[in-house]
Image (tube, grey):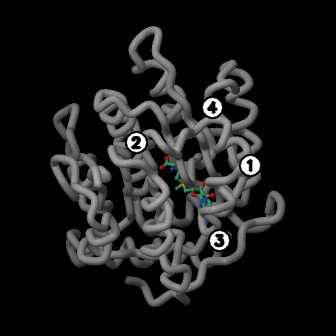
């Protein structure tokens, strides 16, 4: 765990062009265009501290695609993507659209508190003529009831049926002060048996000492953004899934979760910097 103050700031009230934002920087890492000069400058700075950051972001995005396909294959037809980010290649609704068996319906609710992410998600869903089965809620994940009771959520999700809850690369922006476990439990309680929780979290406890130092410098640099971050180790993240049943292969590094290709040298170097897992709510 870093020694950063343990409280994340309040949700942004508008587009902050002065401070870099995690949503827009992540877009820059992935080669997107929804970022400002302040994000790109900061991105270049942190890339010097942690040169694998773009690869690390790509691996996270690839996991997201694999897990959405796995949930569809398991019969889940509803997705709640919390901390969905600025839409970029391989958004959840696109994976769903491309992987869903013909003639079937699935729904997607995106949630992000960042105005650029929310505005761009609205645009892209309109462009893709997807607004009747996908929507965006601009809200802070620390307000679970506002998200779950939001009219868009109620329109698109039936909480009596299984939901795939995606918390991908977002919980490291929630400090201990905001009680991440209690927040996760809140969402878990509201979901039906058969639901999945898929979670990824930046980490470095399995990396070399040199790489750990680089990632810690990277995480410290985020103190100067709208989204300070927290590194956590395997022992802290594993209990977050609670009494839900871990889906095979359990808690792993991203490329080890149901890999779909052989790793190249860069992918292997970037392997230790996340923990990821999927768990299923058992029948009561
Ligand atoms: C690194 S991006 C991840 C995007 C996407 N989930 C993915 O993995 O490809 C993290 C996103 O979480 C959002 N975020 C951070 N803290 C949040 C909070 N408290 N409530 C809602 N969204 C949050 C940021 O705005 C950002 O868009």
Q: State the residue in front, 93 or 62.
A: 93
Q: State the residue in front, 53 or 68.
A: 68
Helix, strand or loop under label 2: helix
**Marks 4 and 3, the one that precedes in the sequence:** 4
Q: CA distance from mark 1 to mark 4?
A: 18 Å
Q: Which residue is mark 3?
A: 225
Label 2 beta carbon within 8 A of ligand 1: yes
Q: Which residue is mark 1?
A: 116
Q: CA distance from mark 2 to mark 4?
A: 17 Å
Q: CA distance from mark 2 to mark 1?
A: 21 Å
Q: Residue at x 67, y 70 (%)?
A: 226
Q: Residue at x 38, y 71 (%)?
A: 215
Q: Which residue is mark 4?
A: 134
- Please name which of the two marks, 3 or 1, marks the residue nearer to the observer: 1
**Marks 2 and 4, the one that precedes in the sequence:** 2
Label 3 beta carbon within 8 A of ligand 1: no
Quadrant for ligand 1 reads: bottom right
Asked whether the beta carbons under mark 3 and mark 1 sit within 8 Å of each other, the answer is no
Helix, strand or loop under label 4: strand
């Amino acid at each position: 765990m870093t020694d950063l103050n343990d409280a994340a700031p309040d949700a942004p009230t508008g587009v902050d062009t002065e401070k870099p934002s995690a949503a827009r920087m992540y877009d820059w890492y992935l080669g997107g265009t929804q970022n400002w000069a302040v994000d790109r400058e900061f991105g270049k700075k942190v890339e010097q501290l942690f040169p694998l950051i773009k690869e690390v972001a790509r691996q996270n995005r690839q996991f997201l695609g694999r897990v959405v396909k796995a949930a569809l294959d398991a019969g889940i037809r509803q997705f709640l993507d919390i901390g969905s980010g600025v839409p970029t290649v391989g958004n959840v609704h696109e994976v769903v659209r491309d992987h869903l068996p013909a003639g079937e319906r699935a729904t997607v609710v995106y949630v992000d508190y960042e105005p650029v992410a929310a505005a761009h998600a609205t645009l892209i869903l309109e462009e893709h003529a997807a607004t009747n089965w996908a929507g965006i809620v601009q809200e802070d994940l620390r307000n679970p009831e506002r998200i779950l009771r939001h009219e868009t959520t109620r329109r698109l999700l039936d909480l009596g049926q299984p939901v795939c809850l995606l918390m991908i690369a977002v919980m490291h922006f929630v400090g201990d002060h905001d009680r991440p476990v209690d927040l996760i439990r809140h969402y878990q309680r509201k979901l039906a048996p058969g639901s999945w929780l898929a979670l990824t979290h930046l980490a470095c406890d399995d990396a070399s000492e040199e790489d750990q130092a680089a990632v810690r410098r990277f995480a410290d640099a985020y103190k100067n953004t709208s989204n300070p971050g927290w590194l956590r180790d395997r022992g802290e993240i594993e209990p977050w899934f609670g009494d839900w049943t871990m889906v095979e292969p359990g808690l792993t590094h991203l490329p080890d979760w149901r890999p779909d290709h052989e790793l190249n040298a860069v992918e292997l170097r970037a392997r230790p910097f996340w923990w990821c897992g999927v768990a299923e709510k058992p029948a009561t």
